[in-house]
Image (cartoon, helix red, strand yellow):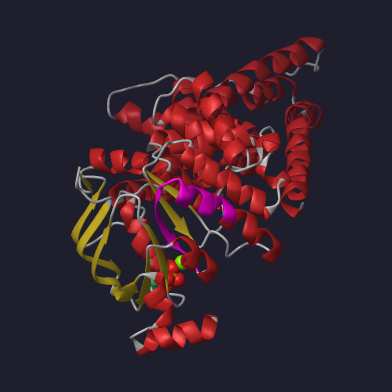
Amino acid sequence: MIREFSSVDLIFIAMAIRWTLILSVIAFIGGAVGGLALALSRTAHSRALRWLSMSFIQVFQGTPLLMQLFLVYFGLAVLGLPIDPLVAAAVALTLHASAFLGEIWRGAIQAVPQGQSEAATALALSYRDRMRHVVLPQAMRVATAPTVGFLVQLIKGTSLASIIGFTELTRAGQIVNNATFQPFLVFGTVAVLYFILCWPLSLLARRMEARMRLAVTR
Amino acid sequence: MTEHAITMRAVNKYYGAFHALVDIDLTVERGERVVICGPSGSGKSTLIRTINQLEAIQSGQIVVDGIALSGGDNVAKVRQEVGMVFQSFNLFPHMTVLENCMLAPMKSRKIPRAEAKATARQYLDRVKIPEQADKYPAQLSGGQQQRVAIARALCMKPRIMLFDEPTSALDPEMVKEVLDTMIDLAREGMTMLCVTHEMEFARAVADRVIFMDKGVIVEENPPEAFFGNPQNERLQNFLGQIA
Ligand SMILES: Nc1ncnc2c1ncn2[C@@H]1O[C@H](COP(=O)(O)OP(=O)(O)O)[C@@H](O)[C@H]1O
Ligand SMILES: [Mg+2]
């Protein structure tokens, strides 16, 4: 039975934003931890670490996020570990974000002149102190804009979790559309909500990039 | 104690297949000032960078201040005793001058903040830029930056100082202020190993001048003999070019 799109539906969709946000935050935090580990491994002395981290990044950058989601969700189920769609989506998105942030941050670390790390080494600073006090603070300035840019991609990427049945923003739209069959209205609303989430971040990223460029040319 | 400040025995260093240091034997006594010169690419930087193991060696032995450079622990100890000044300053741009000078003493030597700050101010005073302490490196001239770099190294209270062409990146009018700082340091008895082409500096403070070519120590002598009576033909050519 088909019914009219009503304020109840709008509230239902708007409430689903919280799952989109929760998923984004989990994936971003997990991805930040994984990405830092990958970036440090990619720039490490050890050949094995460099090779392992590069392989990880290439696999996750070179395959569709949807396949990663399927592998985690259905793969683990086949192995006798049926998991909650939220957990599956969080795991897959974390791995995905780790790979992308790892690559962004590797570039940022390598953009810090070699002499910085050498001076810190000559001052008898440990690897940890070198990274923490000398290299990473400088890399962060380079990395902030592309990191925020990636966060926008990540928020939009969470919509794929709808396919394994996780009721975030996109899936809430699908559910309402199935009942009302007003796709333009329903998905238009969903799209506007994504835009409201992402647009300020895109603006922020662009402003940071402009400021970076100014700082570099100065 | 009779042990030397630096001893290098049969040191060989390769970059891939390229033989950058060939059977280097070098002894530097405590309090000695040694100047290294030679054409570009002759291995001068490589040599002094092996002393604090910014570059690893493939064979031979290096003993610094009685500590053999081998295990990881020793390397850290040696680096605490050896300060280094680079051609390109390499100050930390995101920290003030004072913070640049405090970081290593606090983190590596575990000196309390207040004491590190006092030491930093004392050395900034000695390199004659106490008033720049709260500025960022980018706000200073090249000569001032290099003096900060010297102060930063001295804050670790090293027993040996290495200089790798400290004045080569400077505008001519700033060379003197940096050389004067180095001369002061030499007069105070610091053990110094300086790669430089500033022959005035070599004449003024060096106990010994070393000429390197193609990864080999070709000639070494006190400045009078080194400049007055060079033996090797390559050194004669070299001195002819820079004079
Ligand atoms: N990281 C490196 N990898 C490969 N070759 C290098 C490296 N560093 C220096 N070399 C080579 O080793 C030689 C000596 O370099 P260097 O010690 O910097 O010379 P100098 O300081 O006397 O100009 C040069 O031929 C240089 O090209
Ligand atoms: Mg050099």
In front: B215, or B3? B3
Q: Is residue A63 above or below residue B215?
A: above
Quadrant location, the N terminus of chain B: top left
Quadrant of residue B207 within the rendered picture:
bottom left
Q: Is residue A192 above or below residue B127?
A: above
Q: Tell me which segment is drawn in magenta.
A: B180-196
Instruction: Confirm whether residue A217 shows in the render.
Output: yes
Q: How many numbered marks are there?
A: 0
* Residue plotted at (46% across, 27% down): B106
Horizontal and vertical percent for residue A89? 49, 27
In front: A202, or B227? B227
> Was residue B27 drawn as part of the magenta stretch in this picture?
no
* Residue plotted at (77% across, 33% down): A199
Quadrant location, the C terminus of chain B: bottom right
Q: Is residue A20 left or right of residue A118?
A: right
Q: Is residue B63 left or right of residue A200?
A: left
> Was residue B193 drawn as part of the magenta stretch in this picture?
yes
Instruction: Confirm whether residue A160 shows in the render.
Output: no
* Residue plotted at (30% across, 75% down): B216
Horizontal and vertical percent for residue A194? 73, 29
Horizontal and vertical percent for residue A136? 53, 38
Q: Is residue B150 above or below residue A133?
A: below
Q: Is residue A90 above or below residue B42?
A: above
Horizontal and vertical percent for residue A8? 76, 9
Q: Is residue A80 left or right of residue B236?
A: left
